[in-house]
Amino acid sequence: MQNESGSLFEDMRISPSFQIIAVALSLVSSQVARAEFTPVLSEIMASNDSVLADEDGEFPDWIEIQNVGTTAGNLEGWFLTDDAGNLTRWAFPPVPLAPSEFVIVFASKKNRASADAELHANFKLSGDGEFLALVAADGITS
């Protein structure tokens, strides 16, 4: 849809500020498409009373992490936290994640971080809402 001047937007009568937003979204989209290992917080259950039981038969809150990237990776050394002042509160053990694969971490305060068992963070979630972050292995990036 380029015109002779090479502009994608000139003939479309779109405001300059919208043009900037459209270009920014395009750049972000192209970055996401090229992303490699990209784990994200994909689902959170902060008041679990019957949806998903843990191995103890209890129904703790839970957090789902999904790799939305195009490459497999490992969560080893990544962190979950509910405290903005402590970004390294709970560390993941070696947990490989293929593209589109996910893992559940129970927010039970049971503090279980074994790669061959269910994962349990050392904190619980508040049903009223709170800070929650997945933090990269550098301990800074969320």
Image (cartoon, rainbow, N blue to C red):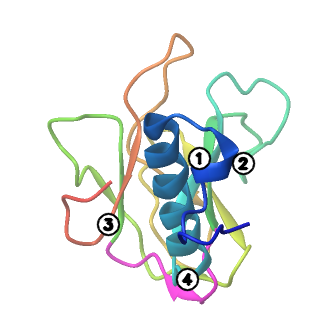
Give how far apart the Cα atoms at labels 2 and 3 are: 26 Å
Q: Quadrant of residue 33?
A: bottom right
Q: Which residue is mark 3?
A: 136
Q: Compared to 4, does 11 lie above or below?
A: above
Q: Which residue is mark 1?
A: 106
Contact between labelled residues 2 and 1, with CB atoms less than 8 Å apart: yes
Mark 1 neighbour class, 10 Å CA radius: few under 14, some 14 to 19, many 20 or more: many
User: Which residue is farthest front?
Assistant: 4
Residue at image location 72% in from the left, 48% down from the top: 54
Comparing 25 with 71, the one in front is 25
Q: Quadrant of residue 123?
A: top left
Mark 2 or mark 4, earlier in chain: 4
Mark 3 or mark 1, earlier in chain: 1
Q: Compared to 26, does 129 lie above or below?
A: above
Look at the image and give the residue range highlighted in magenta: 68-77
Q: What type is the residue that disc 1 sits on? A: Phe
Which is more foreground, mark 1 or mark 2? 1
Mark 3 neighbour class, 10 Å CA radius: few under 14, some 14 to 19, many 20 or more: some
The N terminus is located in which quarter?
bottom right
Q: Is residue 30 left or right of residue 1?
A: left
Q: What type is the residue that disc 3 sits on? A: Ala
Q: How many marks?
A: 4
Q: Compared to 128, does 81 lie above or below?
A: below
